[in-house]
Image (tube, rainbow, N blue to C red):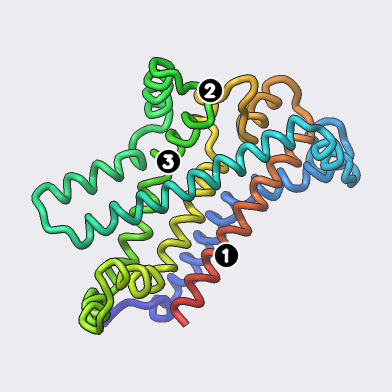
């Protein structure tokens, strides 16, 4: 008999309390940042003495912030396309392929997830500096694809493993070519995995700061790099406003992914 939450008796309250404390620990910093972005004090004071939209007005009036946000969005979209495309090809090979060393290859693809990001950033910076890609859009995209690809492979591989290949074979028997069967049968069936891979790839690129600091140049900076640079010079509530926008977009995309999974299960 499986132990369910309803059968845990008095332990349910203790478990619920622990979950609530963990959620509070994770969410409170976000709540503080959002509140500070609407405070009317020039300094980051909590609780704010009053409320204002002044810092959002300054944020949107500064072309440097807008340029950084657009750069982050552009890099994120390009990274999403490459990450999902490469993740799809790699996942097909890892799930459908029958060859020696497949487990080793899967581990190699997932290495960026467990490797300390600062080590990866230093390695990429040293390589790109030698080949002339440091501080370029191409360098940014390649670096972000490296860290986004493992998440695409996990999401797409999971969708492929739950898809019955017999359905694809049936389409071929009915007259479709192998590639036509994959495009018209397999891809729609694993669309939830592709969408999840796209969301995670974009968010990883959108929020990345450590590698972005190494890849940035005076003329090419993402929004997290701009926040970091401003934070070192002036502790202004504009930083809280920019951080709130980062968090807001992340939450919206995560909600979209959750709704997609819920709709798929229904």
Q: Residue placed at 42% from the left, 41% from the top? A: 145
Please tell me whether mark 2 sits on a helix, a strand or a loop: loop
> Seen in the image, is 50 located left or right of residue 262?
right
* Alpha carbons under labels 3 and 1: distance apart: 22 Å
- Percent from the top left, x then y, of residue 184? 37, 73
In depth, the one of 7 and 207 nearer the eye is 207
Please indicate whether residue 48 sits to the left or right of residue 94 in the image. Answer: right
Q: Image quadrant of residue 185?
A: bottom left
* Image coordinates for residue 56, horizontal then vertical, percent: 82, 42
Residue pictured at 17% horizontal, 58% vertical:
97
Q: Residue at x 67, y 31 (%)?
A: 227
Residue at the limit of the structure toward the left, as seen here? 100
Residue receiving disc 3: 145
CB contact under 8 Å: marks 1 and 2: no
Q: Which residue is mark 1?
A: 256
The residue closer to the viewer here, 175 or 103, is 175
- How far apart, in angstroms, are the residues tagged by discs 3 and 2? 16 Å
Residue tagged by mark 2?
A: 135
Depth check, front residue: 214 or 25: 214
Residue 83 to residue 144: above or below: below
Q: Position of residue 263 (x, y in %)?
A: 51, 77
Pointer 3 or 2: first along the chain = 2
């Amino acid at each position: 008999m499986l132990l369910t939450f309803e059968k845990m008796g008095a332990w349910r309250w203790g478990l619920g309390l622990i979950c609530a404390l963990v959620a509070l620990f994770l969410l409170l910093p976000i709540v503080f940042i959002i509140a500070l972005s609407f405070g009317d004090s020039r300094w980051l004071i909590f609780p704010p003495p009053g409320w204002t939209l002044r810092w959002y007005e300054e944020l949107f009036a500064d072309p440097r912030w807008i340029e950084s946000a657009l750069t982050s969005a552009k890099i994120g979209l390009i990274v999403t396309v490459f990450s999902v495309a490469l993740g799809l090809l790699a996942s097909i090979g890892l799930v459908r392929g029958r060859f020696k060393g497949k487990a080793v290859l899967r581990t190699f693809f997932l290495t960026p997830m467990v490797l300390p990001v600062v080590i990866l950033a230093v390695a990429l910076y040293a390589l790109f500096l030698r080949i002339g890609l440091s501080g370029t859009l191409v360098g940014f995209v390649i670096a972000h694809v490296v860290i986004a690809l493992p998440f695409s492979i996990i999401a797409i591989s999971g969708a492929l493993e739950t898809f019955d290949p017999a359905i694809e074979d049936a389409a071929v028997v009915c007259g479709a070519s192998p590639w036509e069967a994959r495009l018209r049968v397999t891809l729609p069936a694993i669309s939830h995995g592709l969408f999840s891979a796209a969301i995670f790839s974009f968010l990883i690129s959108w929020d990345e700061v450590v590698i972005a600091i190494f890849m940035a140049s005076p003329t090419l900076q993402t929004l997290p790099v701009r926040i970091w640079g401003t934070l070192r010079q002036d502790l202004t509530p504009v930083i809280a406003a920019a951080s709130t926008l980062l968090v807001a977009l992340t939450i919206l995309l995560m909600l979209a992914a959750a709704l997609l999974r819920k709709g798929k299960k229904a």
